[in-house]
Image (cartoon, helix red, strand yellow):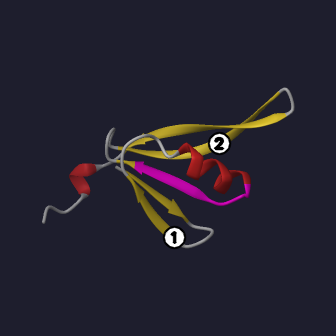
């Protein structure tokens, strides 16, 4: 599962299955401040843009999700 946190719109959405690229790209291209938590890889993904041949492309920096800090219910 992917949890997409959009600080710009103050929303949180969950996506199961494949990487939600078709949902993320419009948000990023519109300037939204977004991070993604992947429960598949236990990572926090932070976007950054690069420019190739005059076109903006989005890539992601991964940080480990500190699951040992999450309280067990």
Of residues 22 and 6, the one nearer the viewer is: 22
**Is disc 1 surrounded by few (<14), some (14 to 19) or many (20+) residues within 10 Å?**
few
* Residue found at x 65% / y 56%: 27
- What's the CA distance linking mark 2 and mark 1? 20 Å
- Residue 62 rendering spot, x and y as whole percentages: 47, 38
- Residue 15 rendering spot, x and y as whole percentages: 41, 53
Q: Check if residue 16 falls in the magenta segment.
A: no
- Residue found at the very far right of the displayed protein: 54
Which residue is labeled 1 in the image? 11
Q: Nearer the viewer, mark 2 or mark 1?
A: 1
Of residues 13 and 71, the one nearer the viewer is: 13
Which residue is labeled 2 in the image? 48
- Residue 12 rendering spot, x and y as whole percentages: 46, 66
* Residue found at x 41% / y 51%: 37
Of residues 17 and 33, the one nearer the viewer is: 17
Q: Which residues are magenta?
A: 30-37
Secondary structure beneath dot 1 equals: strand
Q: Left or right: 20 with respect to 59? A: left
Q: Quadrant of the C terminus?
A: bottom left
* Residue found at x 57% / y 52%: 23
* Residue found at x 58% / y 46%: 22
Q: Left or right: 72 with respect to 17? A: left
Secondary structure beneath dot 2 equals: strand
Q: Is residue 13 above or below residue 38?
A: below
């Amino acid at each position: 599962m992917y949890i997409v946190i959009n600080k710009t719109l103050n929303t949180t959405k969950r996506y199961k299955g494949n990487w939600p690229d078709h949902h993320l790209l419009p948000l990023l291209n519109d300037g939204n401040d977004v991070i993604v938590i992947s429960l598949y890889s236990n990572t926090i993904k932070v976007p950054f843009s690069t420019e190739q041949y005059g076109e903006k492309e989005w890539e992601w920096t991964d940080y480990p999700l500190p699951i040992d800090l999450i309280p067990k219910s």
